[in-house]
Image (cartoon, rainbow, N blue to C red):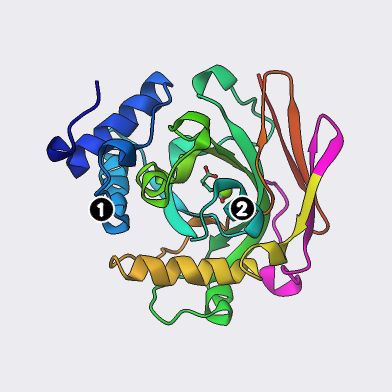
C-alpha cells in the first residue's frame, strides 16, 4: 500500500530510502507517491539521509557529481548534473572484492577523481580556480546501486537517493593535475578483459575541473564548501556496466593508471 502524498515528509522519505538500502530492496520512485517532491526538497532528503548515516558513525570523506557526461544523461534520461555525498563506509580498497549480495543491482562506472589540498568555496569558482585547489588526481571506479527498481527515477528521486551511491575505489597511482591535460585523458572500460566502452575526460562537462567548479558553486547555494582533503568523484565518463559475481570490471587510463573491481 502506498503512503498518501499528504503524509510525506523529508524525514519519512529519508527513512524509506535508508531502509531500502539496509534491506537491499528496490522500490518505486518516491515521486510516484509524492509528486510534489521538488529539487530543493530532494536535497533536504539527501541531507537527512546522510545526517542519519553520520549519526550512526559514518564520516563524510567528500562529494560526488552525477550525470555530468552525455553518456550518463542519455542513459538516465536526465539532463541536469547533481551533487551527492561520499562517506568512509563507501570506500572499497583496491583489490578488495565487491560483495554483490550486499547490494541490490550494482553497476560500475569509470571516473576521474580529485583529492583537494585547499578548501574550495563558491560562488564564482571557475575551472582554473577549481584546479588550483586540487592536490592530486587519480583514476577511479564508482559502484552505483539505485534504490529504485531498474534504475528508473526522476531528478528529485535520484538526488534524494544520494545519487545511487554505494561504493567507490580510487586507483593507486597519484598524479599531478597540473601536468596532465585531463580533457584528453582517455579511459577504456572492460568487462572480463573485453573493452566495452571508452571516453576521455572531455566527456565530463568538457573537463573534469568544470565538474569540480560546478560542485563548488552548487554546494555554495546550500552554504557548503568543499574541504581540504576531500575526495571528489567527477562523474561517470561512460555508461555504467552491471557487475555480477565472478566478473572483473577494469578501467585503464592513458596516464592515471588502472583500477579494477572483482565481483564476489
Ligand atoms: O557518476 C554518475 O553520473 C552517477 C549518476 C548517479 C545516478 C545513476 O546513474 O544512478
Ligand atoms: Mg558516478
SS state under label 2: helix
Question: Residue at position x 57%, y 60% from top?
Answer: 68
**Mark 2 near mark 1, Cβ–Cβ under 8 Å?**
no
Q: Is residue 110 visible?
A: yes
Question: Residue at position x 34%, y 70% from top?
Answer: 220
Mark 2 or 1: in front is 2
Cα–Cα span, label 2 and label 1: 24 Å
Q: From what the image shows, is residue 35 above or below residue 134?
A: above
Q: Quadrant of residue 137?
A: bottom right
Q: From what the image shows, is residue 118 above or below residue 250?
A: below
Q: From what the image shows, is residue 176 above or below residue 127?
A: above
SS state under label 1: helix
Q: Which residues are magenta?
A: 171-196
Confirm or reject: label 1 Cβ below 8 Å from ligand 1: no
Question: Residue at position x 75%, y 70% from top?
Answer: 180
Q: Quadrant of residue 70?
A: bottom right
Q: Residues within 10 Å of mark 2 (few under 14, many from 20)?
A: few
Residues 153 and 100: in front is 153
* Residue 193 x/y as whole percent: 86, 33
**Picture quarter with the N terminus:** top left
Q: Which mark is residue 91?
A: none
Q: Which residue in the structure is indicated by mark 2?
A: 74
Q: Which mark is residue 41?
A: 1
Amino acid at each position: 500500500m502506498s503512503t498518501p502524498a499528504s503524509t510525506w515528509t523529508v524525514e519519512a522519505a529519508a527513512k524509506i530510502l535508508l531502509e531500502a538500502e539496509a534491506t537491499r530492496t528496490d522500490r518505486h520512485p518516491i515521486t510516484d507517491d509524492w509528486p510534489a517532491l521538488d529539487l530543493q526538497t530532494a536535497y533536504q532528503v539527501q541531507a537527512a539521509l546522510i545526517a542519519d548515516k553520520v549519526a550512526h558513525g559514518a564520516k563524510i570523506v567528500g562529494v560526488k557529481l552525477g550525470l555530468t557526461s552525455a553518456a550518463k544523461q542519455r542513459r538516465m534520461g536526465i539532463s541536469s548534473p547533481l551533487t551527492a555525498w561520499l562517506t568512509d563506509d563507501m570506500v572499497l580498497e583496491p583489490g578488495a572484492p565487491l560483495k554483490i549480495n550486499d547490494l541490490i543491482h550494482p553497476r560500475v562506472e569509470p571516473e576521474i577523481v580529485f583529492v583537494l589540498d585547499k578548501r574550495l568555496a563558491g560562488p564564482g569558482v571557475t575551472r582554473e580556480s577549481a584546479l588550483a585547489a586540487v592536490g592530486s588526481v587519480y583514476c577511479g571506479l564508482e559502484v552505483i546501486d539505485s534504490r529504485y527498481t531498474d534504475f528508473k527515477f526522476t531528478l528529485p528521486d535520484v538526488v534524494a537517493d544520494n545519487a545511487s551511491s554505494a561504493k567507490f575505489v580510487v586507483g593507486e597511482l597519484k598524479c599531478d593535475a597540473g601536468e596532465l591535460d585531463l580533457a584528453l585523458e582517455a579511459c577504456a572500460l572492460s568487462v572480463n578483459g573485453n573493452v566495452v566502452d571508452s571516453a576521455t575526460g572531455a566527456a565530463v562537462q568538457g573537463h573534469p575541473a568544470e565538474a569540480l567548479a560546478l560542485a563548488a558553486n552548487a554546494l555554495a547555494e546550500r552554504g557548503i564548501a568543499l574541504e581540504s582533503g576531500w575526495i571528489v568523484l567527477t562523474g561517470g565518463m561512460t555508461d555504467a556496466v552491471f557487475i555480477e559475481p565472478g566478473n572483473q570490471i577494469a578501467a585503464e587510463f592513458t596516464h592515471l593508471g588502472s583500477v579494477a573491481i572483482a565481483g564476489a
